[in-house]
Amino acid sequence: MFSLMTQNSASLQGPFLSRNSAPLSGAIAAPGDKSISHRAFIFGALAKGYTQVSGLLESDDVLNTGRAMEALGAKVQKDAAGRWSIEGCSGKFESPATDLDFGNAGTGVRLVMGLVAGSGIGARFIGDESLSGRPMRRVTDPLSDMGADVETTEGRLPVTITPSELDGLSYAPPVASAQVKSAILLAGLGANGETEIIEAVPTRDHTETMLKLFGAAIEIEPRDDATHIRLTGPQTLTATDIAVPGDPSSAAFATIAALITPGSEITITGIMDNPARNGLYTTLKEMGADLDMQDGPVMSGEKTFNLTVRHSALNGIEVPAERAPAMIDEYPILAVAAAFASGTTHMPGLAELRAKESDRLAGTALMLANNGVIVEAGTDSLTIHGGPVPGGGEVETHHDHRLAMSGLVLGLGAQAPVRVDDASMIATSYPEFLSHMAALGAKMEPAK
């Protein structure tokens, strides 16, 4: 069942070109949220019983997590587009016969490390070249502190976990990361005693929300300028149905495309409304964006909204550094908006961008500079001097899907076409990107 090609992935091969577009119009549904889609596979596999998932994002990254769950012993079946059934293992996984290959999925590999360590089984984790260059000690170190027998390759993949028994711990992550928090909580489900995470900076709370949906006993207490998250293991989850809300990070691309393309007005439906994920939309409003948000239904414990976006004259601003965790994936596309804004936009607190699929801070700066935008990159900041964007340059994606999509959006408002060196990695997170943008009237095509 996992041999299916990701939808539209065949059309996302090689270099692409985007050019100045007529006004964008129409409506699209936000693609399923990637973070929740990963967790739907993981929690469904861990639980007792059958979990039905609707609206799952069928991207390369998410399907790699689904394959891993199947390798651990869960039964995973695709019923229809976006609809999946998972028969869980009641926490009794089996060590896989082969390596768990996560491709480019950072969320998948880090969360499943916690899952495997807490389940008392062993596995070897691998990924593609990009994922193999990303830091893993932020997860493997606290797992080792819990008693996991972990072997890494200089803190990176491959990572091997040998069967071991874990004890709970109290841990304050030095880096604000929902992936780290989630990996430790998943390990804590199978550990002896209490596991506590102390978050000084709030991160996306999808794991806590979904643990409650699956029947976990978990306590969340704001105290002493931090959030204390506690659970006591071992625990067994109970299957439940999951409706995946739309991804605010993916919806950002069409949002900013409409903001920078004169005469545009579009609607995006079903976007998840979570305080730990809405930093971009708050920032765009501060820049003068015409965004009309209307409440949508609650989906699997998450609020949603429908968004109407109109072309706007944007202004440069100072983006608060403390907002970074709520929009860490959106800085490349926010930088595109800043390039078209009047005045200067300063974005501090971006050190985490250097540990993404690529060095996104450097890649974003180069994307803009190659297309005539005046930009200054610091060790953990970007300063962008906005105005008309000349375009005419190439975007070096370094196999990073968000740089590829940001570069294509940049070309829609630039004076000359913008070329992206490779669009293939877009399928890791947003396989419908081209069809959605075409439906709105955007001009994106393979480069000759």
Image (cartoon, rainbow, N blue to C red):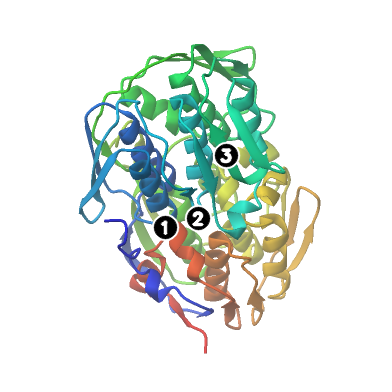
Camera-nearest label, 3 or 1: 3
Which is nearer the eye, 104 or 307? 104
Camera-nearest label, 2 or 1: 2
Residue at 52%, 90% in the rendered image: 448
Q: Position of residue 87 (x, y in %)?
A: 24, 36
Q: Position of residue 79 (x, y in %)?
A: 18, 51
Residue at 37%, 34% in the rendered image: 94
* Residue 310 visible in rendering: no
Residue 160 — which label?
3
Is 141 rendered above or below residue 310?
A: above
Is 240 rendered above or below residue 129?
A: above
> Image quarter for residue 400?
bottom right
User: Gap in Å between the C-alphas at discs 3 and 1?
Assistant: 23 Å
Q: Amino acid at mark 3?
A: Thr
Who comes first in sequence, dot 2 or dot 1?
A: 1
Q: Which residue is mark 2?
A: 103
Horizontally, is 263 left or right of 402 in the view? left
Query: Furthest-left residue in view?
Result: 79
Which is nearer the eye, 227 or 140? 140
Q: In what element is the residue under mark 3?
A: strand
Q: Amino acid at mark 2?
A: Gly
Residue at 56%, 58% in the rendered image: 128
Contact, mark 2 vs mark 1 (Cβ under 8 Å): yes
Horizontally, is 63 left or right of 176 in the view? left
Who comes first in sequence, dot 3 or dot 1?
A: 1
Q: Which residue is mark 1?
A: 60
Q: Amino acid at mark 1?
A: Asp
